[in-house]
């Protein structure tokens, strides 16, 4: 499955940057995926993250950031925790990722809806030359309970380019964008593309149908969500857009899946070669999903390829797998990949970390920080992989024994205590246990797991308290003895 020679991924990315540069936008480098000065984010999840001070009006007017009026970038993003979390969907379908690139253009108090929509239309239909008949637009239909009016401005602008039946209203869930629980936000208009064409696909918009997908979101930032939940108008109106690079590439390369492009296919080849070097013969990636994907081999290809991307970028930008916060999210991602590698691809020990050089060869020219940190990236992944592999087989054996017993007794629920033991003793994150349970047709008692986890934490707190009390007593005893002597 070779990519289109006309639109290789590198050209898709560069064409976007060149177009907006021609429209007086300042090209900006991607910020790190690990936010260094924003405690509200686990990871950078959108291109606008680095521009928050401009949106909030806190950037110094004479600073480089404060002087920006138009900007464009291709931003490294991770959505695997917090408000935007795609981890559980990766592998199951052909369009979700934990790491992806976001192509974006911004106006900081300069142009607004009219120009934003016209730029998008020009780029898609005149530069990328996508067929206009396959394009649908959505706009914010308002929310009476939230006191938010319909975005009739966006609707009327779109009607200059599209017929009424392809300009569709949606509510807050789809067309009111918020970066997190607090921060800049506003109504948005999304651009969807029908991969099939020559049909009425309006009913498929926003229905998670892989043949009719969202490719670009134009957000009109005019409000700020305060910590008490209220919405405050911002000092100026801004435009924040984000287009999925992988999705756009798949469309331009005439592929039905993000994973069938030259963004991923070289990684799939590397996965297969790494397996063959250890004596494992496995079928090439064939793009199957659901029941057609016997043994979930293609799902494993997608999981492993996606997760090596995420971990390489996160480590290059200063994080690593660990016990708390974003580090624990990375540990979950790594262990999920290792599990799929071993149980679906029959990989040997050290397989996952062996993919690092292949990925960096693929992306290192675009993002030099990968090359600069290659040894660190591989060493960290190798160590973390080895740590999990020590308990991987034992944990699975424990799980399978419990799952088989439940099935034999006609049950359908893995106990919270069993899930807790897998987490506490064998290092299996709860979401990975849910994946394994689903393979057996079981669910997991999440409430029971949480109760067991809280009980363990309480015991640890009690033990810590007793230890600190004993230490104080010993200090007092020592002090008394000194006085008596």
Image (cartoon, grey):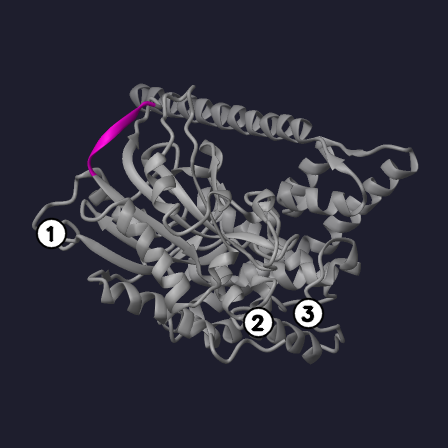
CB contact under 8 Å: marks 3 and 2: no
Position of 117 compared to 264: left or right?
A: left
Front-lying residue, 124 or 306: 124
Residue 445 is drawn in which quadrant?
Answer: top right
> What segment is highlighted magenta in the picture?
230-236
Disc 3 to disc 1: CB gap under 8 Å:
no
Q: In this view, does 467 lie above or below 275?
A: above
* Mark 3, residue position: 285
Tell me where residue 8 appears, x and y as whole percent. 47, 75
- The residue at which mark 1 appears reads as 63
Give how far apart the Cα atoms at labels 3 and 1 are: 49 Å
Task: Tell which circle, 3 or 1, labels the residue nearer the N-terminal end.
Answer: 1
Q: Which mark is residue 267?
A: 2
Which of marks 2 and 3 precedes in the sequence? Answer: 2
Q: Does residue 233 belong to the magenta stretch?
A: yes
- Residue closer to the observer: 113 or 214: 113
Determine the CA span between mark 3 and mark 2.
10 Å
Q: Residues within 10 Å of mark 1 (few under 14, many from 20)?
A: few
- Is residue 386 visible to the viewer in this orientation of the structure? no
């Amino acid at each position: 499955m070779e990519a289109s020679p006309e639109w290789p991924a590198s050209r898709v990315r560069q064409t976007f940057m060149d177009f907006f540069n021609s429209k007086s936008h300042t090209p900006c480098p991607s910020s790190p995926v690990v936010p260094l000065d924003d405690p509200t984010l686990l990871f950078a999840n959108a291109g606008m993250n680095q521009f928050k001070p401009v949106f909030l009006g806190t950037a110094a007017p004479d600073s480089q950031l404060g002087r920006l009026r138009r900007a464009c970038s291709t931003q490294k993003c991770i959505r695997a925790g917090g408000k935007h979390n795609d981890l559980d969907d990766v592998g199951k379908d052909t369009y979700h990722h934990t790491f992806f690139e976001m192509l974006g253009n911004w106006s900081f108090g300069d142009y607004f809806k009219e120009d934003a929509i016209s730029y998008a239309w020009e780029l898609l239909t005149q530069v990328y030359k996508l067929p206009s008949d396959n394009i649908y637009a959505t706009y914010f239909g308002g929310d009476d309970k939230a006191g938010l009016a319909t975005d009739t401005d966006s609707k009327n602008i779109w009607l200059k380019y599209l017929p009424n039946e392809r300009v569709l209203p949606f509510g807050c869930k789809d067309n009111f964008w918020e970066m997190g629980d607090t921060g800049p936000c506003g109504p948005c208009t999304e651009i969807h593309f029908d991969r099939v064409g020559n049909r009425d696909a309006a009913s498929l918009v926003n229905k998670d149908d892989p043949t009719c997908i969202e490719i670009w979101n134009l957000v009109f930032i005019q409000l700020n969500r305060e910590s008490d939940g209220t919405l405050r108008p911002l000092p100026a109106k801004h435009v924040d857009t984000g287009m999925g690079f992988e999705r756009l590439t798949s469309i331009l390369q005439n592929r039905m899946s993000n994973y069938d492009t030259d963004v991923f296919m070289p990684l799939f080849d590397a996965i297969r070669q790494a397996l063959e070097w250890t004596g494992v013969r496995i079928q090439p990636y064939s793009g199957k999903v659901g029941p057609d994907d016997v043994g979930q081999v293609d799902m494993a290809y997608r999981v492993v390829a996606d997760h090596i991307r995420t971990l390489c970028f996160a480590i290059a930008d200063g994080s690593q797998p660990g016990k708390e916060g974003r580090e624990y999210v990375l540990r979950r991602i790594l262990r999920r990949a290792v599990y799929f590698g071993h149980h679906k691809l029959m990989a040997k020990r050290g397989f996952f970390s062996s993919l690092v050089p292949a990925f960096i060869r693929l992306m290192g020219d675009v993002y030099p920080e990968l090359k600069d940190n290659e040894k660190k990236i591989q060493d960290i992944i190798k160590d973390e992989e080895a740590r999990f592999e020590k308990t991987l087989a034992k944990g699975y054996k424990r799980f399978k024994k419990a799952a088989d017993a439940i099935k034999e007794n006609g049950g359908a629920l893995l106990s919270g205590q069993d899930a807790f033991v897998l987490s506490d003793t064998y290092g299996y994150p709860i979401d990975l246990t849910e994946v394994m349970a689903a393979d057996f047709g079981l669910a997991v008692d999440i409430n029971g797991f949480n109760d067991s986890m809280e009980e363990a934490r309480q015991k640890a707190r009690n033990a810590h308290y007793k230890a600190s009390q004993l230490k104080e007593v010993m200090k007092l005893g020592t002090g008394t003895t000194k006085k008596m002597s």
